[in-house]
Amino acid sequence: MHIGVIGAGIIGISVAYHLADRGMEVTVFDKGRPGMGSTGRANGGIRAQFTSPINVALSQRSIEVWETFEDVFETDIAYRRPGYLFLARETTTARRFQENVETQRAFDVPSTYLDPADATDICPGLSAEHFVGATYSPEDGFADPHLALQGYLAQATDLGVDICGKTAVTDIVTDGDGVVRAIETSHGTHAADFAINAAGPWATQVARFIGQTIPVSPRRRALAVLEPEVEVPDSVPLTVDVDQDTHFRPERDGNVVAGGFFDETDPDQDPDRWSESVSLDWAATLIERLSTCADYFGEDTLYRRGWAGLYAVTPDHHPIIEEASPGFINVVGFSGHGFMHSPATGQVVADLVERGETSIVDLAKLDAGRFERGDQLTERTILD
Ligand SMILES: Cc1cc2nc3c(=O)[nH]c(=O)nc-3n(C[C@H](O)[C@H](O)[C@H](O)COP(=O)(O)OP(=O)(O)OC[C@H]3O[C@@H](n4cnc5c(N)ncnc54)[C@H](O)[C@@H]3O)c2cc1C
């Protein structure tokens, strides 16, 4: 069986690795180079503090892999687990946090609801007086997406996966019954029994090759490296000020990676033509908001550098994973969770190709048709 994977981001490469590990012949096509899409721009956050059973399941199965990644893939991915700390300024947000913790505990996620004063034990610089509630899970953390991609790539290549960079997929060839037979690329046609759409923010373009319209919107999000006034210890969690839409996590040398989304509109971007630069106004707003969140930040905080990337967003912030037509699989629309969920997703898609089903998540809930049926999923902990 020959499988063509379209896209060499963390999703496509994880899928390719798992298929090859089960003995399948795999070719990955990328119009650029591996990791040059969203994967190379991600923050690396890994958490199980979600509220939907599907997101929790994808996280828990993935975290099992992240925990052993260094040994299994012989790659240090700088995986650290200081936890995620969510902060509420509004009482309605705090009430939602309490419900979230109840839901998470039912899924065996070890989150706890905290008074802001207690949260200062975990994040010593926190300006607790601005907050009314918090949740924390010590098992969350972050890793380096670039290093993780390299780990997967090395093992996939060892298993015989052919990675074709600078090779754009231009069409999918199907027979009279609509079954995938080949993948057309800028460098010729490749016979294939399966074509897997792992094209991230370009997912709608690839789905169109089989005449399918899927609701995956490329949305611009930005991150910055800041040098705070007071060094942020490595033990500080990825801290999310939910009501101000900002977050930060420790980076090397007391610096942080921070982000936030402050625009009033959030238009779809053209993934081939969008603004990659980050404005100083955005960075100033970010620092201003962080200054009321924790004492680490203030007017002397330095903006080192910033970058933007594209989330591939579905209307319910859950991915689409489905065999859309015979031999054509979508594995797209991961919003801000595609890095953390890539290990489980690779296993899910390998199950789907091999057996047509998986026990990891309920795939019947992840097809694109759910949006037309009105069967959208719900997630209460979305992060911009
Ligand atoms: C600012 C930012 C912060 C983020 N932070 C986090 C985080 O903390 N944690 C987390 O889990 N996730 C995070 N994400 C989300 C995460 O980056 C993505 O969900 C994940 O990288 C998606 O991987 P992918 O392989 O689906 O897509 P991509 O990495 O975008 O890869 C898609 C690939 O497809 C290729 N391609 C497209 N069209 C074609 C074609 N026609 N032919 C051949 N190749 C094609 C592209 O060149 C690209 O390399 C963040 C994203 C951004 C933008």
Image (cartoon, helix red, strand yellow):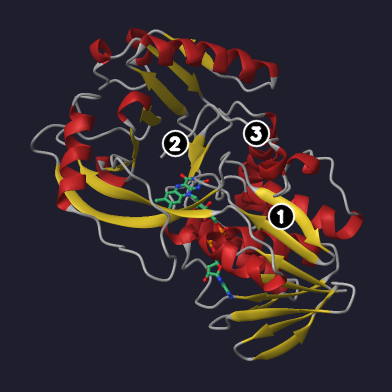
Which of 233 and 183 lies nearest the eye of the viewer? 183
- Farthest bottom residue in view: 188
Marks 2, 1: nearer the viewer: 2
Q: CA distance from mark 1 to mark 3?
A: 21 Å
Residue at the image point whose x is 21% and y is 46% from the top: 282
Answer whether labels 2 and 3 touch (C-beta < 8 Å): no
Which image quadrant: the C terminus? top left
Vertical order, 262 against 192 (above or below): above
Dot 2 amino acid type? Leu
Residue 328, by quadrant, is bottom right
For disc 1, the marked residue is 346
Residue under label 2: 383
Identify whether 79 is placed above or below 21.
above
Q: Please state which amino acid type lies under the numbered disc 3.
A: Leu
The numbered disc on residue 377 is 3
In the figure, is residue 257 to the left or right of 95? left
Amino acid type at circle 1 is: Gly
What is the quadrant of the N terminus in the image? bottom right
